Amino acid sequence: MNAFSRRASIFVASVLASTTLLACSVPVFRYALDHWRPDGYQVFVYHDGEWSEEDEALLRGVRERAEAQGANVEARAIDLSGDPVGADLARWERVTKKEGGEPDLPHMVVNLPAAIAGGEAIVGAASWNDSEVEGLLGSPARGEIGERLLAGDVVWVYLESGDAADDEIRFGLLEAELAKQQETLELPEIDPNDLDEMTAEPEELAIRFSAIRVDRDDPAEKWFTEMLLSTEPDLRDEELVSQPMVFPVFGRGRALYALVGDGINPDVIEEAAVFLTGACQCTVKAENPGVDLLIPVRWDDFVETPEPEDFDLPLVGLSGMVSDETGAPDRAATADASGLSGEANASGVAGESRSADGGSDPDARLASAGGGQEASGGAAPIRDAETVAEVGATDGGEEEAASEHVGSGGLARTDATDWLRWLPWGVLFAVGLIALISGATILRRQETR
């Protein structure tokens, strides 16, 4: 194991330890389908005062289709004659610089969801017209992927390199390995306490892997290709962009990370498959690897998201003491509640960024499970196929509440001995925190050598 693999392993171990309190026995792919709503892509339409009724109707149509078809997209117009400032102006300047001059107006700029890279990860830009909007909101491949995801599949998207012979070999390898993994992997046993987390019965769960090929030169898949290449900041780099890529897609259209070139091999495919079919180690979406894709499906029409369990919490005054029915503070209950407050809020340790081993071979590349954009606090690519970091914070979007995994008996108890039931969780949290601090210390020492 090389130095970078050791460093990555230390980080993964410490983060996994710190997120134990939010673990769930439901497989990752199923928990994501039941719970994780996709974040919206951002569409900015730039114009220069001239804004026709047709342009306004097209903008209104994007919003209506987002509602009617379930496309996770948001759109707004920006008038350049109104002297835009801040992010709107900086974004436009980036586009004009890239295109070598100011493009014809109106012009749309499409960004990844707002939580990634501070909301400024550009997917692409194009003229504002019906054809481009149609291609952005949907494509044949995304329609097929949506149907398979609803059927319970994990869909492995193979983005072709353009080398027909090489693509045939690598896609054949992918299909063969997926068939093997589908037969040999076993789903975790569902904890009875987690049954309410699923919309399916445990006996209905099955491992289903399928693969789909996408021609990156297909005009109908132009925007889909750009989305895939935008899930990590370096996939358009010269040494990678011409390589074949595989993106495991699960849940409601979440791309896990990219397997590139020689990274498309049995060991790396198995690592990704094991993670996706294993127990969900952290139920908070933002603490998990992956970037949402724009797939027009009304997920909630097909998957009834389980509602989190409601807790009857006691009233807490400004002093932090629990009040009884007369309004007098109950100090015994307060002592128990304060002992648990740290645990109940200890979900967010796994958002630290990881550095990449820039000296490793990009063709033997395994993108990190963090994926996404480095500027968002997500993971930089891991180019060593020995290690798959199973946690990350690339998405940084909505944080799904998972209080039911902290405790099922309410957060404040008046029984003076009840704190003992929380002692193991406190120990686990302490171990995770110590591991995180120790790992960071080791990393700093290694970097100074």
Image (spheres, rainbow, N blue to C red):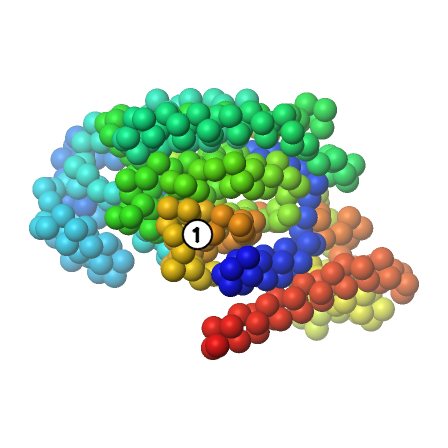
- Write the residue at 35% across / 22% down: 140
Residue toward you, 212 or 410 = 212
Q: Vertical placement of 309 versus 198: above or below? A: below
Coordinates of residue 436 in the picture (x, y in percent): 61, 66
- Write the residue at 56% across / 37% down: 270
Coordinates of residue 120 in the picture (x, y in percent): 32, 53
- Write the residue at 54% across / 51% down: 387
> Can you tell which quarter of the image residue 291 is in?
top left
Coordinates of residue 356 in the picture (x, y in percent): 43, 59
Coordinates of residue 445 in the picture (x, y in percent): 53, 76
Q: Which quarter of the image is occupied by the N terminus?
A: bottom right
- Write the residue at 73% across / 39% down: 194
> Can you tell which quarter of the image residue 66 is in?
top left
Q: Vertical placement of 146 versus 325: above or below? A: above
Is residue 210 in view from this perspective?
Answer: yes
Q: Vertical placement of 29 versus 364: above or below? A: above
> What is the secondary structure assignment of the residue under circle 1?
loop
Residue placed under numbered mark 1 in the picture? 383
| Left or right of residue 359: residue 43 | left
What's the amino acid at mark 1?
Answer: Arg
Is residue 306 in view from this perspective?
Answer: no
Q: Residues within 10 Å of mark 1 (few under 14, many from 20)?
A: many
